[in-house]
Image: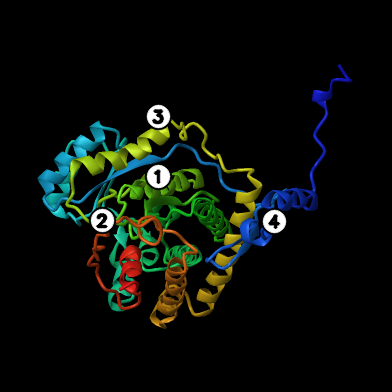
Amino acid sequence: MTNNPFQHSFKPDSSSSWRNRVEKELKEKEYKEFLHWKSINGFDIESWQSSVPQPRVRLQPLKSAWKIIEPIYSQNAQKANELALKSLMNGAEGIWYSKNYLGAAAEVVRSGIDEKVAPVFINDSTHIDIYRPLLKSSLKANFEEHNQPILLNGLRPRERGASIIDEVAILVSQGLESLRKDRKPDSILFYTGVGSEYLTEIAKIRSLRWLWSSILKNEGYEAENPQIFAVNLSNSYSVNDPYTNNLRATSAAMSSIIGGAQFVMIEPWDKTSLPENESSQRMSRNIQTLLKEEAKLDKTLNPSDGSFFIENLTLTISSKVWDQVQTIEKCGGFIEFALSGKLRAQIETNRNILLESYLNSKKTLLGVNKYRPEKVISEIGNSHSRYDLLPDYLHIAKEIQDSRL
């Protein structure tokens, strides 16, 4: 048995020998063009990774699979409750009400839902969007006024052009400031926007988990995972080749799950163009149902651990984020950083970089800047609230289309 060749390990490959073989396959094309990744988020990374990074990214293990959250947009409390109950009977595992129901209306929308099994989130009610008044009207966040759990919103800046580095730095800085305002870790919900840059978004969520557990330990708490509520970015949705929106949503859902979000919500593929309807709601919900029932992603809780590429990408993003957090801290914390105008200026810079990457076709939006249909439909610009301290909402497809006029 000692001579069995299958008992011997393969000889380790070197970066240079691997690259030599790859360059032959590329047939005189540039290695750096195809396999040296230059991200618009401000970092470079080699496709070839043969070791774990140093320092090692050590995440707190996840304890359970994610929950499928259904968005409900109805403005009528009774109708919203009916839609929620129907969704829960058809695969949803929790509810997000986009309307801020209060008082008796809040009781109505919760009626018949066992919240020990299916959590209910009511926008800016069950969890207070604590920094919204600051970003909206330059009013300082009043932590003393509210005693319920708080929501730290990373989706809002992402929808306006913030990079993933910006988003995680904002969330970490807001979380750190919240801890110093005597908020307990279990009362903080991180609400993050997830795009279709598959591996980057996985590493982004892992970075948030690692940095937050490290901060908790440094602040005297037990290291644990943050509560992460992930929502796919719908500002890249297009009415041209609209069903591709489901592919973007699926990529975002997988990144959220593999990265380690506890709650995942998918916005319907036709959200930007059609009224709320049962068909698109079902299609969006079934994306996650398939990822559980067919892909079995709920059976392995930490699937990305040990991937050399993702481990190195997580460290790269974390390093960039931490540098930005230090800049915010030197400004006096997130509130002062936002009031100084530096937050808006930084997001506007990265917004322009993002748009330029689409206009130059470095990034692709199917049906808009590549494989356009013969009959092009006018993209619909959504009306979103304006914020004093943030740029306006960025509807990517409309911006690209308008630039061609």
Q: Which mark is residue 55?
A: 4
Q: Decide if residue 27 is on the left or right side of residue 251.
A: right
The answer to whether marks 3 and 1 mark residues whose Cβ atoms lie closer than 8 Å is: no
Whether label 3 touches label 4, CB < 8 Å: no
> Observer-nearest residue: 77 or 345?
345
SS for tag 4?
loop
Kindly state the secondary structure of the residue where label 2 is placed.
Answer: loop
Amino acid carrying mark 1 in the image: Thr
Viewer-nearest of labels 3 and 4? 3
Task: Indicate the secondary structure of the residue bearing disc 1.
Answer: helix
Name the residue tied to disc 1.
Answer: 250
Q: Earlier in the sequence, mark 1 or mark 4?
A: 4
Q: What residue is drawn where x is 20% and y is 57%?
A: 100
Does the rendering let one see residue 119? no
Among the two numbered marks 3 and 4 on one chain, the one whose residue lies closer to the N terminus:
4
Q: Are marks 1 and 2 in contact (CB under 8 Å)?
A: no
